[in-house]
Amino acid sequence: MHGVKKTVSLDVAVREIPLELVQKAKWGDKPGMSFGGTFKLKLSEFGIKISEQAAGKVNDEWTVAFEVTGLLDE
């Protein structure tokens, strides 16, 4: 980010998506999997400075959360 590369470590949760839920969501007729996690980063560690005008409105530390869902393709 902002020209700086950093390695992040995080725990990832893997979940099975039962066929019943897939059908209820009208995603098709095959079960799937999802995985997701969260990690924190600090803007200052990437050389991003918060201006005086944004101070108090923008936090230096951010939590990034993600979730990816995939369905089986047989």
Image: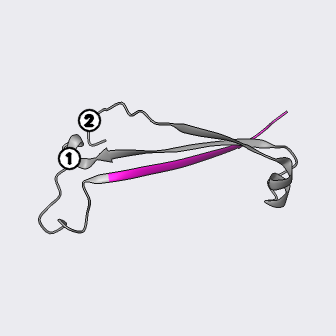
Q: Is residue 64 magenta?
A: yes
**Which part of the image, by quadrant, shows the N terminus?**
top left
CA gap, disc 1 and disc 2 = 11 Å
Query: Sequence order check: which comes first, mark 1 or mark 2?
Result: 2
Q: Position of residue 53 (x, y in %)?
A: 14, 69
Q: Position of residue 63 (x, y in %)?
A: 39, 52
Question: Which mark's residue is nearer the viewer, 1 or 2?
Answer: 1
Q: Position of residue 42 (x, y in %)?
A: 27, 47
Q: Would you name the residue on which mark 1 appears?
A: 44
Q: Nearer the viewer, residue 56 or 49?
A: 56
Q: Residue at 76%, 42% (x, y): give it.
A: 32
Q: Is residue 27 magenta?
A: no
Question: In the picture provided, is 28 more to the left or to the right than 45?
Answer: right
Q: Would you name the residue on which mark 2 appears?
A: 4
Q: Secondary structure at mark 1?
A: helix
Q: Residue furthest left?
A: 52
Q: Which residues are magenta?
A: 62-74
- Quarter of the rendering containing residue 36: top right
Magenta residues: mostly which secondary structure? strand
Instruction: Check disc 2 and give the amino acid type.
Output: Val
